[in-house]
Image (tube, rainbow, N blue to C red):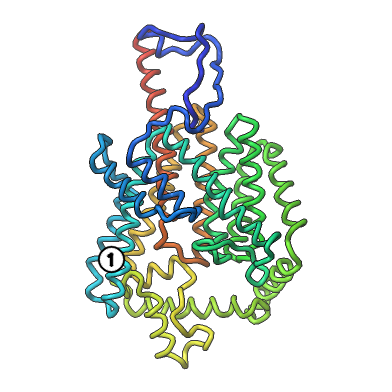
Amino acid sequence: MVQGPPAVQPAQRLTSAAGQAQAAPAPTTVAWVWPWQGVKWNLAFIGFCAYSIAIITYVAPIGEAGMIIALIGLAFGNQRVRFPLPLIFFGAYYAYAVATYPSSVYVPLVKLEMESMGKVALIFLVGINVLMERTRFRFYLFLYLGAFGLYPVRGAIFNQFIYHSAELGRIAWNQAFGNPNDLATLLLFPLGLAAGVLYTERNKYVRIAALTGVVLISMIVFLTQSRGGILSLAVFGLVVLARQKRRLRMLPALVLVVAAVFMFAPQGVWTRMKNLGSATSSGQLREADDQGSAEQRFEIWKVAFTIWSRDPISGVGLGAYPYAHWRAARNNADTFKETARGGRDAHSTYLTVLAETGAPGFTFFMGIFLSVYAYAQHVRGKIKHSDPDGERQIFFAQVAMIALAIAAVFSSWAHIPFTYINVAIMYAMCWILMQKQRAREAAARQAARFR
């Protein structure tokens, strides 16, 4: 676990050069340290925290100002600016989009989206750099989870059970979380982080808060009635249970999640799931009885694949997919059903990226996530025996990333900052734990020289 500094008993302090490399005669006591204690603040980190609060909570329009502060702090601070592999892949993805945009028939629209994605690139750059420090990472982890808990999670529950303003019975909040499918997707990574805190933290109250978060997020994802969200949630739970040797440790969370779902899920949720199951087994999407959503999504995917197949190398340009979809569906009325017409989203991250940037852009885009996942797998192997808590924390983040990859089949999130903030969190977590492992290895080598 990425924790605060341990409190070592005075009798156990080792002061000599040789003694510092040796194990203490008795286990040290790790005292609880509040997340804000001992944080190495700097201007870039303060700005990034302000930006994160703005895009999660919408309590104040300080997002742009926060990022300007963060960029100034990163540019003029004494911190080394790093460009790890996920950031390099993002740079390649963005550079390829810039290089190919003149070939697009939607140049003015693509230029606007390129400006927007340029800002996302700066957010990614700042996030991955400011979080690669232990005290800042730990504070941000609690800030990130707390902001999600107090705003989109609380807000969605209030909308559902107090204000009764759910959209067609499907739970949602507002702004970026206003669509039930998006809400389900955006909560998957916080779910993994909360599960990691629940499994690794020792403080009773923090564990209770983490357990509450796991239960509420799981319930909300189910209540969104999002096919992709529910499937991702199911995979998350199955992988976590399969991994645990002592499954009883996760039993309270599992029981609470199941109880919450059965207690609060309206009848419409079960009807929707039953109809979708019937449609899947029969192959007739009309039987889903979900206002034509499943049939419409499949027809939209057909349009998206057609758009990509016509321009498989350069694509139609960043942000141009809805316009390309409108044109393709209109010009091929005999091929596609009416349900696919209009300026639609592809409802799939993979198809959106393929259609907008072609196969090369898609390769660079996938490199962002595959590289951070591979790095996480490498670090887990290194620290498995020396830092089991840290290994579990990475594991939960990995499973959350797998859940996001599944949700990406049904939703489009290639252009939103949350996607890259999640990658920054996961990479920074692994980097910090790897630095701790290297310090342990160096200490062991030093100890060996004094034997």
Q: Judging from the image, what secondary structure is the residue with disc 1 in? A: helix
How many C-alpha atoms fall within 10 Å of the one at disc 1: few (<14), some, or many (≥20)? many
Which residue is at the front of the view, 88 or 378?
A: 88
Residue 204: quadrant of the picture: top right
In the image, 448 versus 106, the foreground residue is 106
Say above or below: 54 vs 204: below
Name the one closer to the observer, 292 or 372: 292
Q: Position of residue 125 (x, y in %)?
A: 32, 48
**Direction from residue 125 to residue 306 in the image, left or right:** right
Relative to 71, residue 304 above or below: below
Residue at the front extreme, as displayed: 60
| Point 41% across, 83% down: residue | 326
Per the image, the residue denoted by label 1 is 97
Query: The C terminus lies in which quarter of the figure?
Result: top left
Residue 211 sits in quarter: top right
- Residue 75 is left or right of residue 141, and the answer is left
Q: Residue at x 34, y 51 (%)?
A: 65
Total numbered labels: 1
Q: Quadrant of residue 281?
A: bottom right
* Residue 193 to residue 64: above or below: above
Is residue 293 shown left or right of residue 39? right
- Relative placement, left or right, of 367 versus 289 is left
Which residue is found at the position 28% from the left and 66% from the top? 97
Percent x, y of residue 240:
61, 46
Q: Position of residue 432 (x, y in %)?
A: 41, 34
Report x, y in % for residue 236.
59, 51
- Name the kind of residue labelled 1 in the image: Ala
